Image (spheres, helix red, strand yellow):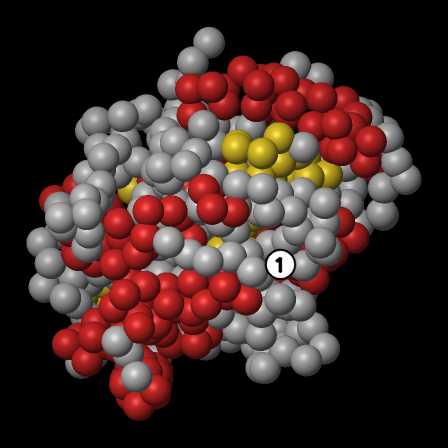
Amino acid sequence: MNSDEFAALDATAQADLVRRRAVSARELVDTAIARIERLNPALNAVITPLFDQARIAAAGPIPDGPFAGVPFLLKDLVASCAGTRMTGGAGVLRDYVSPHDSELVRRYKRAGLIILGKTNTPEFGIPPTTEPVAYGATRNPWNQGRTPGGSSGGSGAAVGARMVAMAHGNDGGGSIRIPASCCGVFGLKPTRGRNPLGPDQGDMMGGLVCEHALTVSVRDSAALLDATAGPDPGDPYCAPAPARPYRSEVGAAPGRLRIAFSVEAPTGAPVHADCQRAVREAAALCAELGHVVEERAAEIDTVAFVRAFMTVYAASAAKTMASLERQGLTPQREQFEPITWALHELGLQVNAGAYLMAVEDLQRTSREVARFYETHDLWLTPVLAEPPWPLGTLDATWEEPLRGFFRASELCAFTPICNATGQPAMSVPLHWSAEGLPLGAHFMARFGDEATLLRLAAQLEEARPWAKRLPPLPA
């Protein structure tokens, strides 16, 4: 198999070739490795190659799962892979080696996936761009001077460049959907509790963080969720069980959906004309497909929501430092990036009462948004308020350590709502700007209803196929 043949296949098609013995797992792995070695010097998506281990795994025996023999990448944050380093984008953890697999990684391996390496992420996944000081910036495959998004930016760039057909990501404020939008791939954030975070986490950031993946196709995302979804013993909560396998939703008629759309940011931040255009075109396409579409937004107490969300983020940064201390490290200011340390210091000022008030305010937002879904099936918005911005835009200094964070809150005004409410949401790659930059359409569904998202996504994928649209990659 040559590189172009590999790039033309989604993970489901790759697995089918292995199942029919048209190619071997080792052939797929070697082709993916060759593609990473060719493209990664320009993109810096993969920071920890695991090629030798992957070749051994591909030699078998491979579990007889839905993705037996398919190459895969792990984001270098949250998901632990035994015997491999996990830095979280932080230089202070450069030599940390995971002692065990997380439950999610166990399920990936049972599905037959072959892990080729770990992808780049910003320090502790904080900013929505992937430019860690310790490991260098990941570059957008559509324009190497632009961000791939974050925090799953390494995974987004890798899938966008077709180094692999799908890669792991996690999402605490948009970190799957943002890079999916920036890199022109499909990104689904599942319902809170759908995928496990154990054994190291019960939940993360008060339930804001979810695990899943960025994929070339909708059917890959659905089949992977079938392979990984479900509670792990001891989880603090779990998502409602699906009515049937998610793969069955791909191609199923979505019915006549009631879709609200809005192009104005809940925070009042300005929204670029290209991002508004992408939403209006997606709304028009949905109307053409027979859905009921109207311009309307959920009514949210935005001031309370933003205050509460930032309180939880700051408290989480302080918790991260406390976790490092528990591991025997002594965090020092000079070991971290300005934004990380500044949020940590803010988090130390959050007392127990303020934290619980923030949680209560986020739960109030959940009730406000849930009422909106009594009359609507989906809410469509931009993923981001601007197209992928130039690298360096969110850089911070010790004189202004939170400058990039506040700028990021303007850019990412749409995605955090679903992290607070726990609802599933997706970025669908339907639009490219005149500059050739991808812009995703952001659809949010009611709690537990990935099925409706996947049905619509498959319908949109058929109407406006995106998989064959490839970025201008280096030779």
At 37% from the left and 40% from the top, the residue drawn is: 132
Position of residue 335 relative to residue 146, above or below, is below
Could you say which is closer to the camera, residue 243 or residue 142? 142
Where residue 210 appears, as percent x and y from the top left, is 50, 64
Q: Name the side, left or right, on which 350 lies relative to 65.
A: left
Question: In which quadrant of the rendered image does the N terminus lie?
Answer: top right
Q: Name the side, left or right, on which 61 lies relative to 72.
A: right
Q: Name the side, left or right, on which 136 lies relative to 38.
A: left
Position of residue 124 relative to residue 473, above or below, is below
Question: What amino acid type should be assigned to the residue bearing mark 1?
Answer: Leu
Where residue 219 appears, as percent x and y from the top left, is 59, 49
Res 141 quadrant in image: top left
Position of residue 136 relative to residue 111, above or below, is above
Could you say which is closer to the camera, residue 15 or residue 101? 101
Q: How crowded is mark 1: few (under 14 residues within 10 Å), some or many (20 or more)?
A: many
Where residue 414 appears, as percent x and y from the top left, is 26, 61
At 26% from the left and 49% from the top, the residue drawn is: 338
Res 396 quadrant in image: top left
Position of residue 54 relative to residue 267, above or below, is above
SS assignment at label 1:
helix
- The answer, for residue 400, to whether it is visible in the render is yes
At 14% from the left and 50% from the top, the residue drawn is: 400
Could you say which is closer to the camera, residue 372 or residue 395? 395
The residue to which callout 1 is attached is 225
At 47% from the left and 39% from the top, the residue drawn is: 120
Q: Name the side, left or right, on which 111 lies relative to 145.
A: right
Q: In this view, which residue lies farthest toward the right? A: 61
- The answer, for residue 243, to whether it is visible in the render is no
